[in-house]
Amino acid sequence: MTSSREIVMHYCHSPYVCQRRKTREITVGDPAKGGVIIGGEHPVVKQSMLTCDTMDTAESVKQTLELVAVGCQIVRITAPTVKDAANLQNIVAELRAKNCLVPIVADIHFKPDAAMEAAKWVEMVRVNPGNYADSKKFAVKEYSDDQYMLELCRIEEKFTPLVQLCKQLGRALRIGTNHGSLSDRIMNRFGDTPLGMVESALEFAIIARKQGFHNFKFSMKSSNPKVMIECYRLLVARLDELGPDWNYPIHLGVTEAGEGEDGRIKSAIGIGSLLCDGLGDTIRVSLTEDSPNEIAVCNDLLAQIPLLTNSGFSIPNSEFPFDPFHFERRVTPEIELSDSLKCGGEQLIRVVVTRATWEKVAPKIRPKDDVKPEAVYEDINVFEIDPTEDFSVNCATQLVTVKDDVNLPAITAFRLLAAKLKRLGSNNPILLKDCINFEIVPLEPKIALLRASVVIGTLLADGIGDAILVRGESGGGQSLRLAYNILQAAGCRSFKTDYVACPSCGRTLFNLQTVTARIKARTEHLKGVKIAIMGCIVNGPGEMADADFGYVGGAPNKINLYVGKTPIKFNIPEAEAVERLVDLIKEHNKWVEPEIRESVAQS
């Protein structure tokens, strides 16, 4: 992408006013018989995925009913083989016999034959362009234009029969690229980039359109929220560039987000940022937990979006204060924040707390604690600005923020502040706040977490922010921990072990929740180390590309260990695998012995 091209491309109506992207409607099943309509003016649809073996019909039916009971509107089931795909007939038949009409999506990787079988029985088939017609070998090869065209013809030959069958049977398709499973062909031409993900999906969309088939949606998933946001922005901009009839709906999700607070924060940053810009027609929050938990987070997240977006305040200038298609931290001067601690420039993004929080947590701070306040808001020199009014800043090294009680949502207000500073030729460092208007009743911790993650995470993904202040969470230690966790999830600071963990499905070769807990118990003290915990090899090696170490299901009860995306040890018995992972970390000089100490964030 050239910079001149990026200037004329847009992914949303305005960075200041939330206006939902207008998409064509697609149907998943017969709406008169329990199917759903995606896109258009219809509400965002919530979906999840089963975690059991697809050959276990009874458990598949049980898990589906549990998901529907908590509000899941589309259920995805993996079909790794033709045999699994054929058993979807039995699963669907039992569900319909129980008057459960929820649409079922078959998740396909590598096996076109499995896709053809699944399409007979389910309402939607998800294909991954990175591995539907290609095997993943991480091969480096230069393609001439003629060779590349021959590859596209080969892919078209493999994909067209599925498109024709879906058209004949009234099925829907999801064209879903994953950051971790782009084909070697795409990787060699575009690299492991958002552009590569988009072009991979568009190749399959072009094949579908050649057959007059339009009943499909796109997804662009990554375990890195910033990469995921860039991918979707670029996808929507490219679709807009291709023409008005390319207005297909999109599915949002951060893949391999993990569990607990970390999984919720990553998902809130990635999904919430895009929803706040008016993008997204279906969503899934991928957690390494029981699937019904995902729907609860979907409900809470969707409920926050109207409260965090501007749909009424008119902003006449829709100039972007950041490059939406290429992440770059906003350039600012380096300044003194407090007690010789600096922020801005190339410094870490700093964590500021209120005096009330400081008084709660200060007595428990220890010299080696990584989670600790770095400045007190009331003590620092910060200029509070109403960005809806004209203002001037006399000093380039003045820290600025948005004034409380400005009549704008926080995301809009901080984007507007950055835009007006840019217009003035000022590049002052900015202190971000998770909220500038306060609720009378304290927020529930789970809601405070989602709101802070969406607001601060969105702005950090824009490249805006040199320090952050979390006030929506009323607990002192909890608000401090939340601030650091948001910075870690957004890829801005690393103060603890980072885990990439898939949410489990029928392909998973071990109990992900149990194993994740076991690995965390041994490694969670390793500051700055990234560990991937993957149930199978479908997305594993690719999603581990930026991980230091990987723990991957290679066969039943057997584990493969990786360094980056390179397999190092194979077929390790599961009972030994965690300790062998620790040995591998030690071999690469990333291991330190844990210290036993109370954390300040528990207050």
Image (cartoon, rainbow, N blue to C red):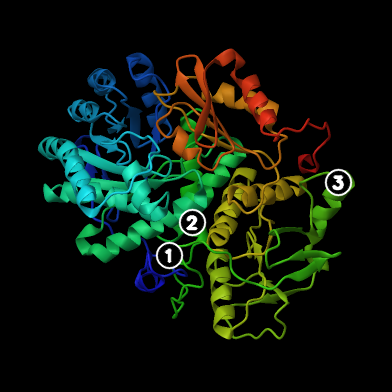
**For the residues marked 2 and 1, what is the alpha-carbon distance in whole angstroms?**
11 Å
* Amino acid type of the residue tagged 3 in the rendering: Ile
Quadrant of residue 159 within the rendered picture: top left
Q: Which residue matches tag 1? A: 18
* Amino acid type of the residue tagged 1 in the rendering: Cys
**For the residues marked 2 and 3, what is the alpha-carbon distance in whole angstroms?**
33 Å
**For the residues marked 3 and 1, what is the alpha-carbon distance in whole angstroms?**
41 Å
Q: Is 590 left or right of 211, judged from the image as shown?
A: right
* 37 up-or-down from 104: above or below: below
x, y (%) of residue 212?
Answer: 11, 49
Question: Residue pushed farthest right?
Answer: 363
Q: Which residue matches tag 2? A: 273
Residue at 32 percent of width and 32 percent of height: 109
* Amino acid type of the residue tagged 2 in the rendering: Ser
Q: Which residue matches tag 3? A: 365
x, y (%) of residue 87?
Answer: 26, 18
Q: Is 437 left or right of 289, judged from the image as shown?
A: right
- For discs 3 and 1, the disc positioned in front in the rendered view: 3
Q: Is 229 left or right of 518, judged from the image as shown?
A: left
* 417 up-or-down from 65: above or below: below
- Of callouts 3 and 1, the N-terminal one: 1
- Considering depth in this image, is 143 or 365 the residue closer to the camera? 143
Q: CB under 8 Å between callouts 3 and 1?
A: no
Badge 3 crowding class, 10 Å Cα cut-off, few under 14, some 14 to 19, many 20 or more, is some
